[in-house]
Image: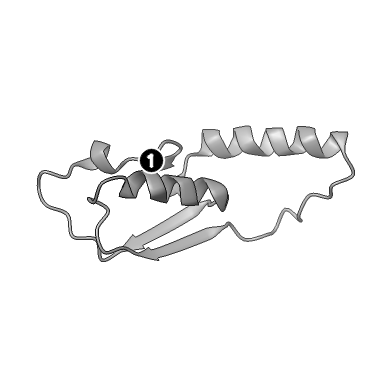
Amino acid sequence: MVRCASTTHHINSQVSRLTTQSSVRQPPADTAPALYVLNAAALTKPHAVEQLAADLASYDTDVAVVTETPFKSKHDDPVLSIPGYTL
């Protein structure tokens, strides 16, 4: 999953606005994106996608790599979608 450019732009503009209002320094522009790697047993369990979404938000994740998740044909993209990210 990769964070959508419009979401990243919105977040960057909000951070920029907040930074100019305080003494917090911004990280250098050449910093690497925040990466989240998960070897999931089953994202099809109840509330698993919601928990993943909460983790991604709390860690301010730019790129999430989810591996070894067995999906069946009944599990389509909308079931596994997380707002602000693309599959």
* Direction from residue 2 to residue 21 in the image, left or right: right
Q: Is residue 86 left or right of residue 36?
A: left
Which residue is depicted at the point 44% across and 56% down? Answer: 64
SS category of the residue bearing label 1: loop
Q: Position of residue 55 (x, y in %)?
A: 48, 51
- What residue is shown at x 48% (from left), y 60% (from top)? 36
Q: Quadrant of residue 37?
A: bottom left
Q: Is residue 63 above or below residue 86?
A: below
- x and y percent of residue 16 in the render? 76, 37
* Location of residue 15 in the rendering, given as x and y in whole percent from the top left corner: 72, 39
The residue where tag 1 is placed is 82
Location of residue 33 (image quadrant): bottom right
Please identify the residue farthest to the left as the structure is shown: 73
Residue 79 percent across, percent down from the top left: 24, 39
Say whether residue 58 is visible.
yes
Q: Amino acid at mark 1?
A: Ile
Of residues 26 and 69, the one drawn nearer to the viewer in this rendering:
69
Q: Residues within 10 Å of mark 1 (few under 14, many from 20)?
A: some
Residue 84 vs residue 55, the one in the foreground: 55
